[in-house]
Image (cartoon, rainbow, N blue to C red):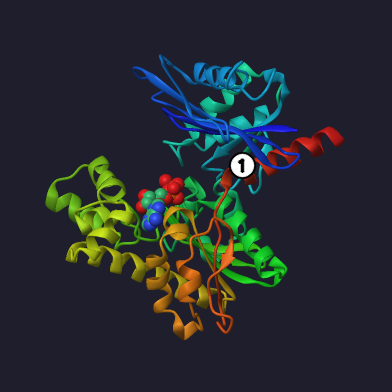
Amino acid sequence: MKVLVMNAGSSSLKYQLYDMRDETVLASGRVERIGMDSSIVTHEVPGHPEVRDVSEILDHVTAVKRVADMIVHPSHGVLKDIKEIDAVGHRVVHGGEVFKESVLVTQEVKLEIRKLFDLAPLHNPAHMMGITAVEANLPDVPQAVVFDTAFHQTMPQTAYLYPIPTVLYRRHKIRRYGFHGTSHHYVSDQAAEVLGKPLASIKMISCHIGNGASITAIQGGKSVDTSMGLTPLEGLMMGTRSGDLDPAIVPFTMNKEELTLSEVNSMLNKHSGLLAISGISSDMREIVQAMDEGDRNAQLAFDMYTYRMRKYIGAYAAAMNGVDAIVFTAGVGENSERLRAAVCKGLTFLGVELDTFLNSEHSKSARIISTADSKVQVLVVPTNEELLIARDTYKLVKEQSNK
Ligand code: ADP
């Protein structure tokens, strides 16, 4: 079975084509600048040079058409006929309280996703455009949706409710949803495999540290708490996002600086975090480099970032009354030994002992980086959200055809 995985944004679209027999990626790529001048399609077949095509792509229907053209192209295509695609799986950021797992797309499902536009105004409408564009180009192909929030739907009320008037939850569904669920789910499965233990027996803290960052407490394979909230702004300090702060800072700053709602929103989402404190960059590589050159603000940004991570790990160890494994994943988590070392250095009270050599090894595979004696196992697990989307899509379509 061939599954096309799609992540549609408002002006971009990323794709991977999987052969599910051995879960290999046949081709991948992206369309950028949809609806703008000179849109770019970049297409790559493993082992071959990247192909780029610049042309006008005004909407998502045309974008999907171009992707299909690339996939069946006589020289850089990988399929003879687009009908060889058996299913399409979409990443959808917000599934609200309705979607607790991945589902096949139906009229009802589309209606529910539309109802969630308010909760994810930047993402869900774009995902819907992706779904509609696939319908227009591949009308008979089943589609599935995989939600960033679904994995966290197992959180108990104690963890997902905010201590504010409950009418706000009842009326507007204001609560913690959490994000990066597909990644936390994928790496927790992988980590259990590496540890050789059933997931049901492990208390795990999974740290997805990329441009956006979140930490999840996973007990028996289920998310029991996570650092992102109603939106992906809560929790850890991130590249450009503030993460946790005193909510009173919002009205106070608006008043003192005469900022509008959208200005304060943009300040907290785009001009805070590593970027604000270092004054240099939101990219951890540049922070570490500047820090090594003696830049004190970069050092402060790094220290705040890792301090806040450590506080969450401590909190989640308390939430689960213990922790067996800590997992690092995503751009920073997978690649920055400096970050992992700094975070783990302050966790010796939990029994965390990092193996300096294993931590510094460069490898693309899931691995343990703690010492043999460490009470808590520490792992690096490369995330692969696309593969989990492909797997869920494959499973749903197969179940449907067996009915
Ligand atoms: P996104 O949240 O956009 O999916 P990623 O998970 O791809 O992000 O992470 C991207 C981030 O990973 C970059 O902004 C960069 O800061 C960080 N990163 C990548 N490689 C390294 C590295 N070797 N050391 C430190 N940080 C890195």
Count of number-bearing discs = 1
Give me the residue at 65% from left, 59% from top.
189
Vertical relation: 140 (above or below) 254: above
Q: Which residue sits furthest right? A: 403
**The C terminus, quarter of image:** top right
Q: Residue 121, image x and y in percent?
A: 43, 36
Tell me the crowding category of disc 1: few under 14, some 14 to 19, or many 20 or more residues within 10 angstroms, Cα based.
many
The answer to whether residue 232 is visible is no
Residue 240 in picture, x, y percent from top left: 30, 50
Residue for badge 1:
146
Q: Nearer the viewer, residue 193 or 273?
A: 193
Q: Residue at x 45, y 40 (%)?
A: 120
Image position, residue 262 (x, y; %):
26, 40
**Picture residue at 19% right of the left edge, 56% below the top:** 252
Along the line of sight, which residue is nearer the eye, 207 or 358?
Answer: 358
- For the N terminus, the image quarter is top right
> In this rendering, does residue 195 appear at all?
yes
Location of residue 68 in the rendering, given as x and y in whole percent from the top left corner: 59, 20
Residue flagged by tag 1: what amino acid is it? Answer: Val
Q: Is residue 290 above or below residue 196?
A: above
Tell me: residue 131, above or below residue 65.
below
Residue in the foreground of this view, choosing between 21 and 120: 21
Determine the image quadrant of residue 106: top right
Camera-nearest residue between 127 and 364: 364
Q: Secondary structure at mark 1?
A: strand
Ligand 1 under 8 Å from disc 1 Cβ? no
Give me the residue at 69% from left, 38% from top: 393
